[in-house]
Image (cartoon, rainbow, N blue to C red):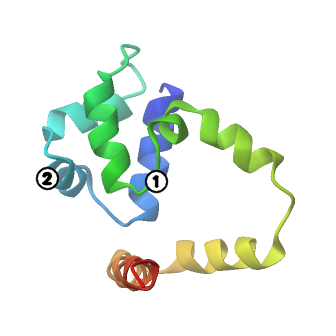
Amino acid sequence: MSIVGENIKQRRKAFGLSQVELAKKALVSQSAISDIENPKVTKLPNIDTIGKIAKVLSCTVDDLMGDGIKKEQEAPRDPLRESIIRDYDRLPPEARQLVRQYIDLLAKR
């Protein structure tokens, strides 16, 4: 799987979204999401598709292309952040979606 496909898959799962749900929200086909995340596909999707997906996943195109990972790895270790992420990962998809909605609400203030 390309780094783009892996990044999209990880972020999609963190948001508790299925491929179908991500496709609907990003206004792209489900087969496009499936192709991007398919480990056998080596062709990169077009930048417009990546941009639509990035918007839904609250990140930048650079984050999905791999640049964001380097920045995160260079950041100093934050035990509180790690604990929150670990707890979030343990939540069922429905609860993750509620957490995401709450964060979005707080970010709009």
Vertical side of 107 occupied by 57: above or below? above
The residue under label 2 is which amino acid type? Answer: Lys
Vertical side of 49 occupied by 93: above or below? below
Q: Residue at x 29, y 21 (%)?
A: 46
Label 1 neighbour load within 10 Å: few <14, some 14-19, many 20+: some
Q: Residue at x 37, y 18 (%)?
A: 44
Residue at the top extreme? 43
Q: Position of residue 4 (x, y in %)?
A: 47, 31
Q: Secondary structure at mark 1?
A: helix
Tally of numbered discs? 2
Vertical side of 106 occupied by 59: above or below? above
Label 2 neighbour load within 10 Å: few <14, some 14-19, many 20+: few
Vertical side of 43 occupied by 89: above or below? below
Question: Looking at this view, is 95 or 106 the one in front?
Answer: 106
In which quadrant of the rendered image does the C terminus lie?
bottom left
The residue under label 1 is which amino acid type? Answer: Arg
User: Which residue in the structure is indicated by mark 1?
Assistant: 11
Residue 85 left/right relative to 98: right
Label at residue 24: 2
Gap in angstroms between the C-alphas marked 2 and 1: 16 Å
Q: Position of residue 79 (x, y in %)?
A: 82, 74
Q: Residue at x 43, y 33 (%)?
A: 5
Label at residue 70: none
Question: Looking at this view, is 11 or 41 the one in front?
Answer: 11
